[in-house]
Amino acid sequence: METKSKIIIGSFIIITLIGFVNFIFAATGDFITNWDTSGQTGIDIYGIDTDNEYIWITDDNNNRVWKYFMNGTYTTDNWATTGANARPWGLAYYDGRLWIPDIVGNAVHQYYTNGTYINAFNTVGQSDETGITTNGTFIWVSDAGQDKIFKYYMNGTAFDSFAVSSDAWDVAYTTDFLWVLDRTAAEVYKWFVNGTDTGISFDISVETASPRGMGGNETFFWIADRTDREVYVYEGPGELLPEDTCTYSSGIWEINCADYCNITTNTDTGSDNIIVSGTGSFTILANITTNSFAYTPGCNIINAPNDGKELRIKGGG
């Protein structure tokens, strides 16, 4: 690909393209890979999050935070949590800072990413602060004892809370949604930030038996497994194809490319439809015949039985 730019106009997304472009479609929650943390002596991994350059993991056994590159390589950087932060379970990153809850002191502690301590606030009505996430405007703290998500302003002032219909061990924020980790069922549930259940979830039980921490962004989810000391990586929500009703089929994907491109590699039955059999991610190589590739609300999914997963575009390149 030689050129790529994106312009958002109302409900249209226009991507200017020259040459060939790979559009990668994947279902949220599809397993990608895993990597090992056990090289660190006695590590007991819990919380995990990222700034998209590094990944931080809390260690309940050593009361430390360990820093990794995005591919799972250890950076050799780690630091101890403050004495008051005796049980560092969850972890959230935002704007050069980390927030780590503590179930002993019923508080949330704030650090710079180099380990310099900033301050703390006491939680309200909580006793098992097992997980945490933030979007820079609010902080959400999961409580596995009550199966609830508690919401705070960034200064620690309590806002509200809502109950979930599963074990609320950890929570991760992506645009407009909260993803709640159920360690018992090894399942991740999607909630609107207002506490409404979307009815969507994905299973992680095949890969992980003891999930304890979850972090995420628009591209990936990371699940930390306490028992095998592995981090499991899953497809994140990506950029939703315009309607939430777009679904993933475990058998055949069929997407109508309409008038915007000619498909050069696919099993094509006509009308520029993309038909791909099998499960997991797949790549479509599209030859753009005009100066722009555009789509409008209505993703034109054909023949895709709903198995509870959404179809999302993961990007081009």
Image: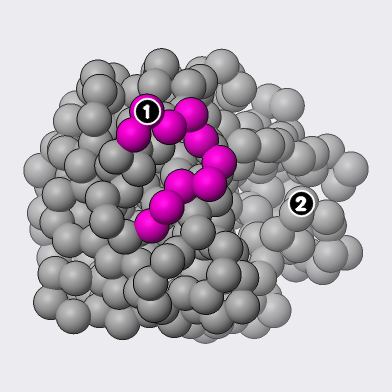
**According to the image, label 2 marks what residue?**
72
**Is 83 rendered above or below residue 30?**
below
- Where does the N terminus fall, quadrant-wise? bottom right
Q: Secondary structure at mark 1?
A: loop
Describe residue 300's horizontal placement relative to residue 313 as left or right. Answer: left
Tell me residue 42's x, y (percent): 82, 39
Q: Earlier in the sequence, mark 2 or mark 1?
A: 2
Tell me residue 107's x, y (percent): 39, 61
262 in magenta: yes
Tell me residue 8's x, y (percent): 25, 79
Tell me residue 132's x, y (percent): 40, 55
- Where does the C terminus fall, quadrant-wise? bottom right
**Is 262 rendered above or below residue 254?**
below
Describe residue 150's horizontal placement relative to residue 265 as left or right. Answer: left
**Is 63 rendered above or below residue 83?**
above
Colour approach in the figure: one colour
- Badge 2: few (under 14), some or many (20 or more) residues near its Cα, within 10 Å? some
What residue type is disc 2 on? Gly
Q: Which residues are magenta?
A: 261-270
What residue type is disc 1 on? Thr
Q: Is residue 54 visible?
A: yes
- Disc 2 from disc 1: Cα separation: 42 Å
269 in magenta: yes
Main secondary structure type of the part rendered in magenta: loop
Q: Nearer the viewer, residue 284 or 177?
A: 284
Q: Nearer the viewer, residue 238 or 49?
A: 238
- Badge 1: few (under 14), some or many (20 or more) residues near its Cα, within 10 Å? few
Question: Which residue appears at 24% of the width and 36% of the height?
Answer: 301
Q: Is residue 214 visible?
A: no
Question: Which residue appears at 39% of the width and 21% of the height?
Answer: 252
Q: Which mark is residue 269?
A: 1
